[in-house]
Image (spheres, helix red, strand yellow):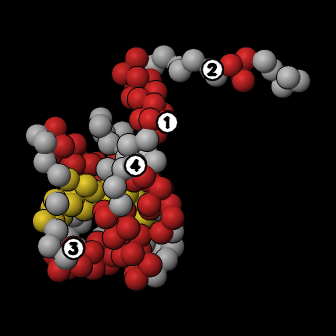
């Protein structure tokens, strides 16, 4: 599997650590930077490239995922989710990393380099990369609703239970 990485200065140490860890575990790594510490760098230029790399690979039918890293992981997740075809989830535990894959078929994970230990964040990435999508109908349906909204900007129909009002 190919794994695209992008971060900012706050995620540089984890990105460098993950590069070695991923290579040691037989992943192909594409590092989109940064490559040196610059306290004034901006995460979008690196994280958007990582997400574009994943989207491009997947469009070609390649097995590809991504990891974006910042101080909290929030801005990096927001950036990655701007790329068509990307579903990026913020992971802050093993459970959120697994659910991002099982329920949301996320193809990029975001982690906060200042939020957890190096070992914990490495484990979140490992869980994310090794957990399959469940393929359950309800998850496929929900992902499809978001995809349709992305394409058309039309809101999904409300379920019957929401049409009865708060006093039902």
Q: Nearer the viewer, mark 1 or mark 2?
A: 1
Which disc, if any, is residue 134?
4
Q: Are marks 1 and 4 in contact (CB under 8 Å)?
A: no
Residue 5 in which image quadrant: bottom left
Q: Measure the alpha-carbon separation of dots 2 and 3.
A: 43 Å
Q: Are marks 1 and 2 in contact (CB under 8 Å)?
A: no
Q: Measure the alpha-carbon separation of dots 3 and 1.
A: 32 Å
Is residue 122 visible from the viewing direction of this image? Answer: yes
Q: Which residue is mark 1?
A: 138
N-term-proximal mark, 3 vs 1:
3
Mark 4: give few (<14), some (14-19) or many (20+) Cα within 10 Å: some
Q: Residue at x 44, y 78 (%)?
A: 120
Q: Nearer the viewer, mark 3 or mark 1?
A: 1
Is residue 76 visible from the viewing direction of this image? Answer: no
Q: Measure the alpha-carbon separation of dots 4 and 3.
A: 24 Å
Secondary structure at badge 4 equals: loop
**Left or right side of 5 for 43:** right
Secondary structure at badge 1 equals: helix
Q: Which residue is mark 2?
A: 158
Q: Which residue is mark 3?
A: 22
Q: Nearer the viewer, mark 4 or mark 3?
A: 4
Mark 1: give few (<14), some (14-19) or many (20+) Cα within 10 Å: few
- Residue 79 in the image, given as x and y percentages of width and height: 37, 47
Residue 66 in which image quadrant: bottom left
N-term-proximal mark, 4 vs 3:
3
- Residue 45 in the image, given as x and y percentages of width and height: 27, 52
Mark 2: give few (<14), some (14-19) or many (20+) Cα within 10 Å: few
Q: Measure the alpha-carbon separation of dots 1 and 4.
A: 10 Å
- Residue 160 in the image, given as x and y percentages of width and height: 68, 19
Q: Measure the alpha-carbon separation of dots 4 and 2.
A: 25 Å
């Amino acid at each position: 599997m190919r794994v695209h990485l992008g971060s900012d200065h706050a995620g540089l140490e984890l990105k460098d650590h993950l590069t070695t860890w991923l290579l040691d575990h037989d992943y192909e790594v594409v590092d989109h930077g940064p490559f040196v510490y610059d306290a004034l760098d901006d995460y979008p230029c690196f994280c958007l490239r990582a997400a574009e790399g994943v989207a491009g690979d997947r469009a070609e039918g390649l097995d590809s995922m991504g990891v974006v890293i910042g101080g909290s992981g929030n801005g990096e997740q927001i950036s990655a989710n701007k790329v068509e075809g990307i579903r990026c989830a913020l992971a802050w535990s093993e459970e959120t990393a697994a659910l991002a894959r099982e329920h949301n078929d996320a193809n990029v994970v975001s982690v906060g380099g200042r939020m957890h230990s190096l070992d914990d964040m490495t484990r979140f990435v490992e869980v994310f990369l090794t957990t399959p999508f469940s393929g359950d109908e309800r998850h496929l349906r929900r992902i499809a609703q978001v995809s349709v909204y992305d394409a058309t900007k039309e809101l999904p129909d409300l379920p019957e239970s929401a049409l009865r009002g708060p006093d039902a």
